[in-house]
Structures are given as C-alpha cells and as structure tokens.
Amino acid sequence: MRGFDRRSFLRGALSGAAVTLGLPLLDGFLNVNGTALASGAPLPLRFGTWFWGCGMNPGRWNPKQTGTGYDLGPELQPIADVQQHVSVLSGFNVNLDGRPNHPHRTGVTGTLSGSAPPKPHDVPAPSLDILISDELGAATRFRSLELTCTGSAKHSYSRRAQNVINASEASPLALYTRIFGPGFQDPNAADFVPDPRVMLRQSVISAVKDDRTRLERELGAHDRQRLDDYLTSLRQLERQLELQLSAPPPLEACLPPDAPAEGKGDSEVGHAQETHDLMAKLLVMALACDQTRVFNMLFSYGASDLHLPGSQTGHHQLTHEEQVDAELGYQPRASYFIDRSMEAWASFVDAMASFPEGDGTLLDHSLVMAHSETSFAKIHDVLGLPIMFAGRAGGRMVSGTHVAGGGDPVTRVGLTVQQAMGLSVDRWGSGSMQTNRSISELFA
Amino acid sequence: MIPRTLAVFAVCFVLWACRPTEEPPSVGGPTAMRRLTGDQYKQAVSDVFGDDIVVAGRFAPDARRKGLVAVGSTWGTMTPASFEQFESMALSIAAQVVGETHRSRLVECQPASSTQPDDECAGRFLRRVGRQLFRRPLTDEEVQARVEIAANSTRSAGDFHAGLEFALASLLMSPDFLFRIERSEADPLETGRMRLTSETVASRLSYFLWNASPDEQLMAAAENGRLLSVEGLGEQVDRMLESPRVAEGMRAFFADVFSFDEFEDVSKDTILYPAFSRKLVEDSQEQTLRVIIDHLIDQRGDYRDLFTTRKSFMTRTLGLVYGVPVATREGWEPFEFSEGSQRSGLHTHVSFMTLHSHPGRSSPTLRGVFLREAILCQEVPAAPADVNFTIVQDTDNPEFKTARARLDAHSTDPTCANCHRIMDPIGLGLDTFDAIGRYRKLENGVPIDTSGDVSGEAFSDTRDLGQVLHDHPAVSACLVEKLYRYGVGRDTVMSERHLLRYLEDRFEDSGYRLHALLRLITLSEAFRTTSGARSVEKDLGQET
C-alpha cells in the first residue's frame, strides 16, 4: 500500500461523488510507525482544559495511594472505567502571598495564570490555554474553541488579559455551524477546489489592516493596546483564509458529523449533561479534523449553579448552606453534583479514548487537564485543588497514576502542561508560586 | 482656568452648602474608543441600509465597568472568535445590500457595464456609505483603497456588484466602524485646553440621546463647523431632544443601568415557576422600559415618582404573574394598581424581582446589592472567602422559616454582618415577591416582614420603601452620575465632582425632569472638553 495516494483512491472509488465513507485506516496515510502522517508531519498534538465548579470533598475524592493503580474514593468511583487514562494530581495549592482569597476566582486564576489575583477579576497573566494556543493555534483554522454546557457565553476562563476573554459557545448547533458549516474543508474530499471568494476576502482584510495602521497613530496607549488585539484577531482570520487556499492533508479519522440537536441552554444538571455530550462529540470530531488543537470545556462554571428540577437550591448555594450530615460526614445534596460532574468527566475521557487515530486514540495525542476553582467549596478552599490529566500527549506523558503534591504550588502543574506541549519554558508563576520544578513522574 | 477652579472651590469650602449657578470649569477626562454593542451595530446597519437587511450573527458579550456597558465598552476588545463573526456578518450584509432585491434602492448609480469595474460609481457609493458608517467623511486614501477592492473583485468575479460587495464588507469590518473612536483637538478659545472634534461631538450626542449614529442634519452641522458654536450645538440638542428617537436612546440607557442584557442568562426552575417563560422575560423588561419612557419622556414627569408610581402597562403574560385581569388578547394595555397596592414603584416590577433572584427562590441580598449599586450608586464589597453560610437560606431548617430569619442568624457572624447590614434590610423590603415577582404574604406559612431601613430611613413595607427611595437624595444624584458617565463613556474624574454637584442642583431646580438633565449635560462645556487620548490606566474591574 505504500506510495498509494489517498486522493486518487477516493476519486477511483467514488468517482467524485459526494459520499462520506467510514474507511478503514489505510497504512499509506501514515508512516510505518503510525505516529505521523505520510507527509512526515507528526499527528497533531492537542491541549484542552475541562472545568467543573465547586470542587470536591477532599476525604472522599483524594486517593490515598500514589502511583499507578491508585485507589478510588467514593467521589472518584465514576472514573473507574477510564482510570488507566486518568492521572490524579492531588495536594497542589494556590499560595495567596498576602492577597485575599476571592471566592470562586482565586483558585481558577491561580491555576491558569500562575498568580493569585490581587482583585477578583484580575488576570495577572494569560491563561495556560492561551500560552499554548500561541504556540499551536496558528496551524489550524481556530486558535482554540471554548465551550460551555450551562448556557452563558460569558462564562469563560480563556483570558489573555482582563478585557480579552474568549467567549464560549453555548449552543451545540452554533458550534456545529462554526466548525462544519461554511468554510469547512473536508480534508478527505475527493477534489480540492479553492473557493475564489477566499482571495477576495483576503483583499478585504488587507484594506482593513491599513485602516488599523492609520488609526494607531491617533490613539493613546490604552486604545492602541486594544487595537493590537484587533490586529491579532485579524491575523488569525488571515491565517484561516490562507489555510483554505491549499488542500488540507488527508486525515483518516475525520468524518464530518451531522448537525446535532440543540442544547437546552440552562443549568439544570440533566440538561448540562446532554449539552456536554453533544458538545464533546462535536469537539472530538473538530480535533480529528484538525480544525483546532486547543479547547476549553466548561461542564459548569465557578460557583456552579447546577441544580435539579424542582429544587430551590443549586450546587453552589448548597455547598454553603447545607449542614454537613453528622453521620455521613459530608453534605449529601451538594455532593450529588460532584458525582454528576465526575461522571461527565469520565464520559469526556471515554469519548476521546474510544476515538481511533493513527496507531492509538485521539486521547493518546492529547493532554486534557480537568480542574476546579476550590477543593472544599464550603469554605472556598484553594489548598489541595482537585486536578486530573487525561491523555499521553503524543507519548510524552504517562497516564493512570496519582501524584500527591504535598502542598506544592499549583504552578508545578501548569509548568508541566507547558513542557508537555513542547513550549520551551523552565520557570513559571509569580511570588512564592514561581517554580522551575515540573512534575517529573508524569513524563514518559 | 485654574484660578477659576480654585475660586469656586474656596468659596464653596467657606459657604459649605453653596450652589454654583454657573457650570464649574472642568478639564474633562480622556477620549473613549468604544466597541459597538450588538444593538448599536444592528441599529447602524438599519439606519444606513434599512431594516429589511438581516443581521444574523452572534455578538461577543459586553462587560460592565462602573455599572455600565457604556463604560465597559471602552475596555472591550476583539477576540479571534468575534472578529470571525464580524467578517461573516459583513459579507452577508454586503451581499444583501448590493443584491438584486435591494440594489436599485441602496446603490445610487448604475455601472457603465455590469461586468466591468466602474470606479466613479463605486467611489460615489462607497464615499456616501462610508461616511455614514464611520460617522465622519472618509479620506481620499480610504475611498481609493475600497475602489481598488471593488475593481479587483469585479475583474475576478466578472460582476460589478459582486465587486462592490467586497468593498462594502471592508467598511463593515474596519475598526473605524466597529469602534466609535473619539478624537480631540486644541481648543482655539483657550490655550492648553483640549476639546472634542465636531464629528466626535456629533457622535457623542447622537449615541447619548438616540443610541444611534448621527443623522444627516447632525453630520452636516458637524462638517460645516456650526456644531462647535454654542448656538449651533443648542439647535441640534433641542432638535434631538424633541425627536421621538430620544425614547430609544433612554431605553438603551436604562436597560444598561438595570443590566437587562443579563436576562439572557436567567433561567428559573420550571417546576417551581411554571409561569416562567421567555415571553415573560421579554414582556417584563418591556413593561419597565414602557413605564419609564411614558413617565419621563411622554409625561415629562419627576424622576423620583418612578419609585412610587402605580401606573403601568400589562400583557396577558404579565397579568398572570401580577394576578390582574388583562382584557387585551395580544399586546399591551395601560394599567393602574389600586391605591394601597404593594405594587407601587419600579422596584416592585417583575423584571427586577426575576433578574435579582436565584433560579429557585428570591434573594434579598441580590436585590439589596442591585438597589444599592444601580439606584443609589453605592458600592457593596465582595463577600469574604471563609464565610460560614450554613444557616443562610437552608430553607428546610425548621427553625428559620423566612429569609429574614435565616439572614439574621447568618449575620450574627461579625464578618458577614458588616456587609449584610448594607444589603439585606433594603432587599428584605421586597421579599413579598418571589423569584419571578409574584406577590406572596407568607413564606413556609409564616408572614413575611418587609420592614427595614435605608441608611437610617425606616420603612414599614414595600410601598413605604418606594417613598424612602423617592425622598432619598442619593437616588437623583445617582441618575445624574450614571447619565453623565454613560454619555462620556468613562468613570467620572475627581475634578468633576463640582460639575456633578452643579448638575444635581440644576436637576433639582427643574423638578427632576429628564429632558432638563439631558439638556444640561449635552450643553455643558464638560461634555465636549477632554484631557486627550487615553494612556494606559488601571482597570476599573470588570463586573460580570
């Protein structure tokens, strides 16, 4: 099969008809080891975050044994079936360095930016996904995709700065249209015909770029910075158009899906799960079709308002208001939502792990970091934050192990992520959170 | 200028309660570059091309700063995802405008050949439309760049109008359209002073009063320089204030102050609140805005009376929640609540009660924060992290049946008490309204006590709370401050405190008439004075 050209195969097989086939993996598309495309380019490496709100109960969530085959406490039971793909990182802290602990803010900003925010909405440094999409995002149509399962586009932790926030897609249907609607080029299409309009759109962008250059001279520093963000966005679109002018390399695993059902768009827990599964399915295909290599999925937001139908009180309110049950030793109604969140996470891992790509699965070529804004939400605790990794980052990472951080700064996790994704960085974080120690146990 | 400031300040200091009758001098604040909101974008497209042009796309959410999107929009930037949307909207709008259905009305000239470039015709169209979209005349260079796009695209597509489509799209994607960019110049009348250019004054006026781009008359006054004279400005302000479009402008202002955009994210538990629907959400906002516009604009009423008025408007959907009969099957009818009704004043509207509640129950705290921040302009500090909320609103706890009882218990903790003393008493005055604003007397079988106080002024029930708000000096001062911030697109600066005081006094003299206040602000020297381009400054803090 070597030397066999996929396009001629398709042309021969389908005579150019618009039919999508689930083709078996043809060795000709991959190198002999199955780790790279025939063109020599390695299979793309992806990074994503998966967030759930209001943390966990440390005694019921943290494994007691470290290393592989770690024990699953009651709140990690839902991941039993995917445990081999999931590493647990317990006991990593956000250090406040004298700053206040801003409820539902400090934990997530500390984890993603490497500093505790002085004020609640401060973004001291770009979030991890931005650092990574700066490195990986230029190769794909979308720098990154932000998704939320509870309806509000405003919910997003993907932040370059306090006023540069990547809004989330809240609707599965809108997400589908954005990825697979107009502008999508099937990498496996039999014929590649560049759209003549793309070049005209490029000329439009070039004129608009000149407007921006003229304008820049008239503005003060505050607005020049904002205009720089405009330019960054414009360049991203320019890059997308450029990609559309050449035939994309074939990607065996890419099979454009049908339009999904619309999500309910609210925070009732059953609806959030439905939306999550619809979004996850689309995301998996967007990754397989190499439309993006970076994503941020919010199952729920910080101070999660997930709730049950007919209930007056949602997850966040319950974490504060529900009495700790004297017999059980935890808050049963609040903890219900932790279980549902872990189930959703397990289904997400499964969706990526059961999607074949190359010699393994999509998850093998990815690194996904699941995290939350607190450990014990009742007191907004940012010590011992719950964090999990899934995926082997193209063979660079091991999976299925438990690392106990022992109170180390959470920046060790962020530094590990960056190094796993190939960024040349040896130090990250600020104040007492600055670290040059990535988590060596996690590297293969 | 400096001596004048000092003199006014010194005299006021001595006389303490002095009321300047002349506008105190001000150096203004920096100019603003505001990202168009979704509504403003749609309005601009409709004003230039007509309302049959469909604007289909998603706008990035707007963030509030200092309680206003109008201020937050001077921080808003462009993310890749939103620019992607703007490009696709621009192409779709442009295709409609030059398409066969609309071109005879919207494109003023015919090309010499329908398949060849025609620079003269393209230039004419692009220069006219560009001036409307950029809110200023285009430079020759800017027109030329577009004419070239049109010509090149025409050659490539073999169709004049297809070429024009791309040139038009480039106007709609330009930062000059997507941002409202204010410009300043040296004031020839006073050395060292900066003023807004006439085109910037036109834009500020028009977005402030109408929430829209300047119309032809205003553009003309800006371009011939008449707008820079006191008389010329007065003519335009009077004309604009008499126009029915002021209603649109003030709807936009109040919707911003009241955070009505946040309704997009409101959901209620449909088992507990089966009457909750998107229609209820829409009607409730419309009801509040109708009451405001009717009272302030149509009746030219006293602003403070909004907190005591029993006059309203109803639809059948609203009638179900308010528990009143509505004869009109479709649409609106005027309605007046009976004397003695607890439904007196804006603050008892379903819109506010719904927006400031949890999905499953009311929230005196959220309502208190809203009234403090949006109506009284008082800042409420954020909650500390290590709070023990165990008792608060554990609605199943047999010991604490009402929100008041639960919050009282919570407030025994001194850390909590400090803030809850500010937020709760005022919000508890509204607790007879549930999470969608239905009236109730009991919670868990126990009568709800709605007495409380606002900064020491006691009230016994919701109606009484309205009277306290009506008489509270901070309520009218807050409107002045918000309206001024909204108009200039920034937080007020220290040097403007005398100006605000002056505006408050004149507002009082007018009998608290909105028209008088709008006129005062737009004719003030401060409104057209600036300290110049904006340098890097500390973020005010986004509110979401």
Image (cartoon, grey):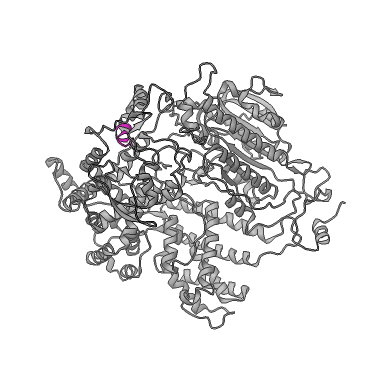
Q: Is residue B488 visible?
A: no
Whether A22 is drawn above or below A195: the answer is above
Q: Quadrant of the C terminus of chain B?
A: top left
Where residue A395 appears, as percent x and y from the top left, is 74, 36
Q: How many marks?
A: 0
In this view, the residue in front, A232 or A43, is: A43
Judged left or right of residue B520, residue A339 is right
Where residue B188 appears, as percent x and y from the top left, is 26, 62
Q: What is the span of residues highlighted in magenta in the rendered image?
A: B424-431
Q: Residue at x 71, y 24 (%)?
A: A69
Q: Residue at x 18, y 51 (%)?
A: B511
Q: Residue furthest left?
A: B15
Q: Is residue A98 visible?
A: yes
Q: Residue at x 75, y 44 (%)?
A: A357
Whether A442 is drawn above or below A147: the answer is above
Q: Residue furthest top?
A: A327
In this view, the residue in front, A151 or B239, is: A151
Does the magenta portion include A348?
Answer: no
Where residue A127 appears, as percent x and y from the top left, is 54, 40
- Helix, strand or loop: magenta stretch: helix
Q: Residue furthest bottom?
A: B112
Judged left or right of residue A323, residue B225 is left
In this view, the residue in front, A188 or B350, is: B350
Where residue B397 appears, as percent x and y from the top left, is 42, 23
Q: Quadrant of residue B297?
A: bottom left
In this view, the residue in front, B139 or A383, is: A383
Judged left or right of residue B343, residue A258 is right
